[in-house]
Image (cartoon, grey):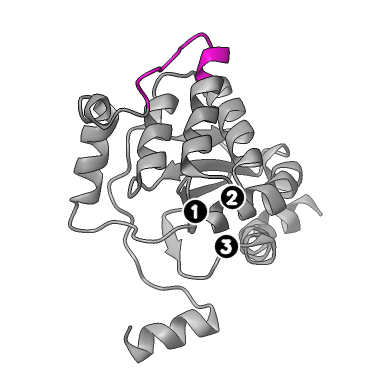
Amino acid sequence: MKMTHLLILFLGLTLPLFPSEKLDSCYQVSFGDPSAPIHIVEYFSFSCPQCIRLFNRDFQKINQEYIEQNKVHWTFHPLPMDLPTLQGMHCLANLQNHEKQLFFKTILSEAQGISTRLLVAMMKKAMEVFSTPLSDLSDPEYLKQTKAFQAAFDYINQERQVHEVPMIEIDGQIYSSFPDWDFIHREIELRLQPCNAEAT
């Protein structure tokens, strides 16, 4: 890694990255009012320990403070670089958004430290609960025939794309700083300052 990139990461400054073309919304999970003044995208993987930890440690607070207050619209965008995330994408594509939210919360709340095999078993069980069984979810040949596989292939072959997770995009700007409550809270409050001033 170049020294300038190391310095930027160390100081927590914005790295001028360009958002890639996103996956179709059927593979994403959204929370909150789409007309909220701030839009945040978190790029995640179902096999990323930091993504799981961020969700379980900080997302509930973010949801209560900002999403439920209609200040932030939050979207989880999968980064399809591993098999569990591809399998998760295929599940999400078969669900309505309120079902996606429940699926996402259920899987990530139990995903810390478990094996890939158990993670996929949980996905299968969840899809059975939603009356959309995907018994072939563990079969690589089956997955290669899915629209999720083609979408993942197209995404990772873009000239520009997000390469790391978790990564945060706020109102179209991708940040290099590791996302946690302190960072996200600070960035949201900075953007809400004009609104807060008008309210007073």
Whether residue 189 is in magenta: the answer is no
Horizontal side, residue 79 vs residue 200: left or right = left
Q: Amino acid at mark 3?
A: Pro
Kindly give the residue lying farthest to the bottom in the view shown: 3
Q: Earlier in the sequence, mark 2 or mark 3?
A: 2
Magenta extent: 127-137
Residue at 21% from the left image edge and 30% from the top image edge: 144
The one nearer the camera, 191 or 106, is 106
Q: Where 82 sits versus 178, above or below?
A: above
Which secondary structure type mostly characterizes the magenta part of the structure? Answer: loop
Residue pointed to by mark 1: 48
Kindly report the distance in space between the C-alpha atoms of the residues bearing marks 1 and 3: 13 Å
- Looking at the picture, how far across and down is residue 106, in whole percent? 63, 32
Work out which quarter of the rendered image holds the N terminus and state it. Answer: bottom left
The nearer-to-camera label among 1 and 3 is 1
Q: Amino acid at mark 2?
A: Ile
Kindly give the residue lying farthest to the top in the view shown: 131
Residue pointed to by mark 2: 52
Residue at 41% from the left image edge and 54% from the top image edge: 172
Residue pointed to by mark 3: 179
Q: Are marks 1 and 2 in contact (CB under 8 Å)?
A: yes
- Binning the other alpha carbons within 10 Å of mark 2 as few (below 14), some (14 to 19) or many (20 upward) gives many
In which image quadrant can residue 88 be found?
A: top left
| Residue 32 visible (yes or no) | no
Q: Amino acid at mark 1?
A: Cys
The nearer-to-camera label among 2 and 3 is 2
Whether residue 135 is in magenta: the answer is yes
